[in-house]
Image: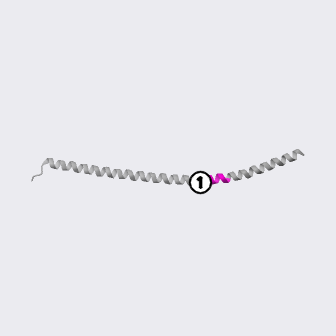
Amino acid sequence: MPISYNMMSSEVIESAEVIENIEAMENAEVIENIEATENAKDMQDSEELYQQSKKNFKWMKNMEKNFKQLEKIVDEINSYKRRKTMA
């Protein structure tokens, strides 16, 4: 049976469609990989920010303790000055 032009052109069209579908799937995979990489980087950045925040909070709490000690010293000095001036 001889191959007609219509059969060949339909096979070419089908092949082109298959190739387009494969390319679309590959592009979708590439996009998914890029998004996954970006999400992983965002998660890593978030984790680093969280760890830095924890360190900052600990530093702040330690500084607060130091200021409380300084406030106590200032209060003692002020009360001592009042005692001297009242006598």
Dot 1 amino acid type: Lys
| Residue count near mark 1 (Cα–Cα under 10 Å), binned few <14, some 14–19, many ≥20 | few
Identity of the residue drawn at 15% across and 49% down: 7
Type of secondary structure dominating the magenta stretch? helix
Please give left or right for residue 4 compared with residue 19 in the image.
Answer: left
**Number of numbered markers:** 1
Q: By what rule are the colours in the image chosen? A: one colour
Please give left or right for residue 23 compared with residue 85 in the image.
Answer: left
Which residue is labeled 1 in the image? Answer: 54
Instruction: Write down the region rendered in magenta.
Output: 54-62
Does dot 1 land on a helix, a strand or a loop?
A: helix
Does 53 lie within the magenta span?
Answer: no
Q: Position of residue 27 (x, y in %)?
A: 34, 50
Task: Please identify the residue farthest to the right as the structure is shown.
Answer: 87
Q: Position of residue 84 (x, y in %)?
A: 87, 47
Task: Please identify the residue farthest to the left as the structure is shown.
Answer: 1
Q: Position of residue 21 (x, y in %)?
A: 28, 50
Identity of the residue drawn at 80% across and 50% down: 76
Identity of the residue drawn at 78% across and 48% down: 75
Please give left or right for residue 39 compared with residue 79 in the image.
Answer: left
Identity of the residue drawn at 59% across and 54% down: 54
Q: Position of residue 1 (x, y in %)?
A: 9, 53
Does 57 lie within the magenta span?
Answer: yes
